[in-house]
Image (cartoon, rainbow, N blue to C red):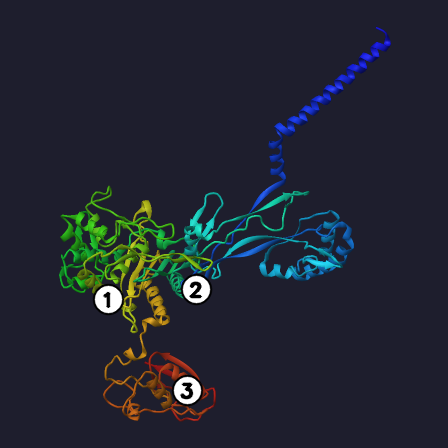
Amino acid sequence: MNIRKSILMRVYLAFGLMVFGALLVFGKLLHLQYVDGGEWRAMVDSLTIRERVIEAARGNIYSNDGSLLATSVPEYELRFDAMSIPEEANDVFNSKVDSLAVSLASFFKDKSARQYLAMLKGARQKKQRYTLIKRDVTHQELKELKKFPLFKVFKEGKKRYSSSLVAIRENKRILPFTNLAARTIGYKNTKGDTVRVGLEGAYGSYIDGRSGSQIMQRIAGGFWVPVNREVEVAPVDGSDIISTLDVNMQDMAQRALEKQLIASDADNGCVILMEVKTGEVRAIANFTRDSEGVFREKYNYAIAQGADPGSTFKLASYLALLDDKYVDLSSSVDIGNGTYKVPAHTIKDSHAPKKSVLTVLEAFEESSNVAIAKLVNTHYGSQPAKYTSKLHQFGLAQPLGLQIPGEVNPWVKTPESKTWSKLSLVQMAYGYELRLTPLQTLSLYNAVANDGKMIAPLFVKEIRHLGNTVQKFEARVVNKQIASSEAISKAKKMLEGVMTEGTGKRLSSPLYSSAGKTGTAQMNDGARGYGQRRYQSSFAGYFPAENPKYSIIVVIRNPRKGYYGGAIAGPVFKELADMVYANDMTLHGTLAARKVNTAGTKVPTTLSGSKEASTKVYNALGFTPTNLNSLLQRRDTSDKPVPFIETQIKEGVVPNVMGMGLTDAIFTMENAGFKTRVSGKGRVVNQSLLAGMNLKVGTPINLVLN
């Protein structure tokens, strides 16, 4: 083969290889385009295009009185699109950017105008379209920012330029009243498994609304920017929840509970205020010791902590005895020296009895453990199932089915229970060997106040969307009649007796009647049992007794400064009831219907002081005596008239304040120019300086009250 042919062969071979390679490349291109193209395009899109979820504004939660308990407020992340002004319009950009930098520096006060200018111009040079300006910007701030140069749409000559501001909205959940009923309002946690707490969790499907979407594109630098300024699918805002809570009552409840927890040095506690007829919960407070003297809402003890209720459960035991007609209020029970021996155990009363034989009414009023254990053991000892069946009949063994999650199931054992023993019946009689939450116990008291009808507590009254009612909730009856009307009536008398003659006597008010029961129980400390001497103090009741409107339970656990229910939990009941009574005008009736002079025909006490002021008081109280001058000659409620002394105040002259109350005495002395020192309480019975003496202004005087 000659050289020419050899060269041609090599050329043809090389050319053939090149053509073959080109055909392979072309074939591969066709395969990628038409066979694998869809898959690769989807992959590219997933890396450069994505759909961003636009969260809907969550619905609000309102209180019963229309106050806002929880709401969503928009917050924005602000970005700067440096290329919204075309490159050919650099002169327009440069004429506005200085003013924008000055405006941003003045508004946010976090950088100087020079620093903002460098950042904005740097973004322009790098052709960035998504430069971060600020996070967590409020809606009101955004409205102001939209007025800044380059951030607003403007015209330059005949040409219109769009805004360089990119605002990305996020919704932030806030509680306007901060910690007020925070645990009941709850929250929604979407990290990992969704945690449902309170109203936020229970009604999340209504509150959340429906999310929208917006197409985002990835640009240089790894930033994601909206393809369009407007969202593709607009979000639908959530519905509003109208709760039963009352802001003022909730505030009262929290303040009263926190004060007593600090005073008694307790671990935790709760208080619930509920309307008797409707079951609507007006206030529910739960506090846990966070540090010395500091308590916070961390756990909803009211619905989630089941424990031995103690003496507040005696109401159920006596109600069973009354309903089965085993006893009457006048039935007698011999408690001996306040001890009662049962197999392997001796039941003791907390105090030595004043007498050995009590009526059923007296035994309840004095909260005798021996009396109720003896009565239950006597009448149900041979048939314990009848007693436990009665408790189940009352509805105490079934959960209330609350509108918020977290309710612990009650536990009321029966003779078939594995833990039933010879002691179980007598222990249950006074509130041990069973488990109830505070709200479950309150439902029993509320049922008695409600003439025997037990209703499930209500936390939500209504759901609204855009102002229109979506759903309404009314009281759900758990048990139409837990016991006979006769038994309920007697139980009411027993509860009223506690407040007038028994362990709750010092908690009663002269302004309104109340009914209730104190409770003290040793706390079970797990494997260590009851040996640690830790107590749960409680009080449950309702008011006004003759026409109940509100029921309340207070539970305070492990107080270190006392532990009896009347001394620890009772004051919270009284303070809350007093405040509610003072604020709820429906409890007062009309002025004409009030019994102003409860002493009958006796003249009310009139202390020495101003005749004009006394006359005004009598008129305000509706007193219209036939002879006002004669009436003002009396200073006390005795039959013997006492001359009324109208005190004259003259600077430097010692006034006569004998017989005055503390406020009037101090007012009179201070206005006469004397420094007052006081001891005792009641009326002034002695003053150290004689009336009528002329002395130097500022002279001290001692007043003794008795």
Upstream in sequence: badge 1 or badge 3: 1
Whole-number angstrom distance, CA of label 1 to CA of label 3: 43 Å
Amino acid type at circle 3 is Thr
Percent x, y of residue 666? 41, 83
Q: Which residue is mark 3?
A: 668
Is 157 on the left or on the right of 45, as rendered?
right
Image quarter hosting the C terminus? bottom left
Q: Is residue 112 visible in this depiction of the protein?
A: no
Q: Residues within 10 Å of mark 2 (few under 14, many from 20)?
A: some
Residue placed furthest toward the front = 158
Q: Report how many numbered discs are placed on residues in the image.
A: 3
Question: Could you tell me residue 121's position as x and y percent?
Answer: 74, 52
- Of 403 and 689, the residue lying toward us: 403
Residue depicted at 75% across the width and 48% down the height = 125
Instruction: Name the residue tied to disc 2.
Output: 66
Instruction: Reply above or below: 392 against 698.
Output: above
The foreground one among 459 and 25 is 25
Gap in angstroms between the C-alphas marked 2 and 3: 46 Å
Q: Residue at x 31, y 77 (%)?
A: 590
> Looking at this rendering, what residue extends furthest in the top direction?
1
Near mark 3 (Cα within 10 A), the count class, few <14, some 14-19 or many ≥20, is many
- Asked which secondary structure carries label 3, the reply is helix
Question: Would you name the residue on which mark 1 appears?
Answer: 496
Q: Quadrant of residue 14?
A: top right
Q: Report the side of 131 relative to 341 (left or right).
A: right
Callout 2 amino acid: Gly
